[in-house]
Amino acid sequence: MTEKDYTPTVAYLGPEASFTHIAATYMFGRTGLRPFPTIPDCIEAVAKGHVAYAIVPLENALEGSVPLTIDYLFHGSELFINAEMSIPIEQHLMVHKEQKNAVAQIESVQSHPHALAQCHKFLQYHYRKVPLFQTTSTAAAAKYVSEHPEQCIAAIGNRLAAEQYGLHIAEENIHDFHFNHTRFVVLSLRKGSLDRKGHSDKPKTTLMVKLPEEDRSGVLHQILSVFAWRKLNLSKIESRPLKTGLGNYFFIIDVLEDENHPMMIGAKEELAALNCSIRSFGSYFTYDQEISERA
Ligand SMILES: O=C(O)C(=O)Cc1ccccc1
């Protein structure tokens, strides 16, 4: 993909100061970013050509895949992955400044389901009886808290969200496990890798592989050996429901190689010969951000 001299519009899971916003800023800078309220809204905006790119969370180190992204990306979308970035996630408990002395009386905690899950032990231990409410993003929760100063409620989100919405951080780093990273993907209607500074040496290719209709023993073994004997390194394999019936699955396979490499071309041909159906989401570079790099 060639760089254009205009700033592309980029849809991200908003509002401002979500983790996705942080990832989007890291990848594209501050201009041209447009917040959308939900992941499906971001995916639809890029699929309909309203924006050039969308950036959405794909997978968290603690919680696994983000089901909404997987559902909308792998079921019927015609999008490609142009880049992936991984950012460290630190979660903080925040309240309205007017409620900063009432933290012991918090009546509810809101956040994105993954953020609530990442802080499960903390919440169990400190706020066992407090109801938890899911929001579309951590920043949406912070914004809601900022708009309800009279309520003794808390949000879980990042430091930027506390600053953006003027909230008081009542407890820092409440995520249960230290290694809490999330992978985000940049999507567009065009195949090709975004080439920015600091990317991985090797590109990665994401394949969606559907097993042959006829049920035969050893088919998963056959699929894996297609990659194994070619020394193609897999960085992920995940089975997801096909949604056509109980027990029907497809596989998301990430391979650390460009899809145009002769071994990859051979692998795709062999998978087709095994009666698998394959859809490639393209080859793309990966970017890793550390907290110290944040603006
Ligand atoms: O809610 C957000 O801020 C997001 O961008 C999604 C998310 C939620 C929890 C961890 C990482 C990303």
Image: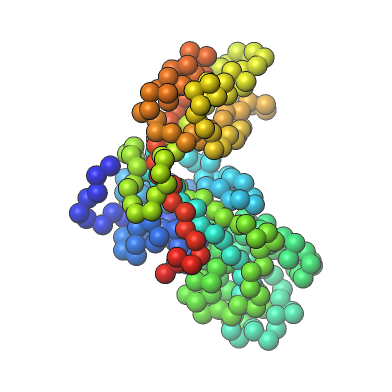
Residue 31 seen from this side:
yes
Give percent across and percent down for residue 191.
Answer: 34, 37
Lateral position of residue 195 relative to residue 257, left or right = left
Seen from the viewer's position, the closer of residues 65 and 104 is 65
Measured along the vertical axis of the image, is residue 217 above or below residue 180?
above
- Which residue is depicted at the point 64% across and 13% down? 216
Seen from the viewer's position, the closer of residues 265 and 29 is 265
Give percent across and percent down for residue 196.
Answer: 33, 52
In this picture the colour scheme is rainbow
Give percent across and percent down for residue 201.
Answer: 40, 44
Measured along the vertical axis of the image, is residue 21 above or below residue 234?
below
Q: Residue furthest left?
A: 5
Seen from the viewer's position, the closer of residues 222 and 217 is 222
- Which residue is depicted at the point 61% across and 17% down? 219
- Say which quadrant the N terminus sits in: top left
Give percent across and percent down for residue 108.
Answer: 69, 70
- Which residue is depicted at the point 49% across and 34% down? 255
- Which residue is depicted at the point 39% across and 61% down? 25
Lateral position of residue 115 relative to residue 2, left or right = right
Residue 13 seen from this side:
no
Counting the numbered discs, the total is 0
- Say which quadrant the C terminus sits in: bottom left
Seen from the viewer's position, the closer of residues 280 and 200 is 200
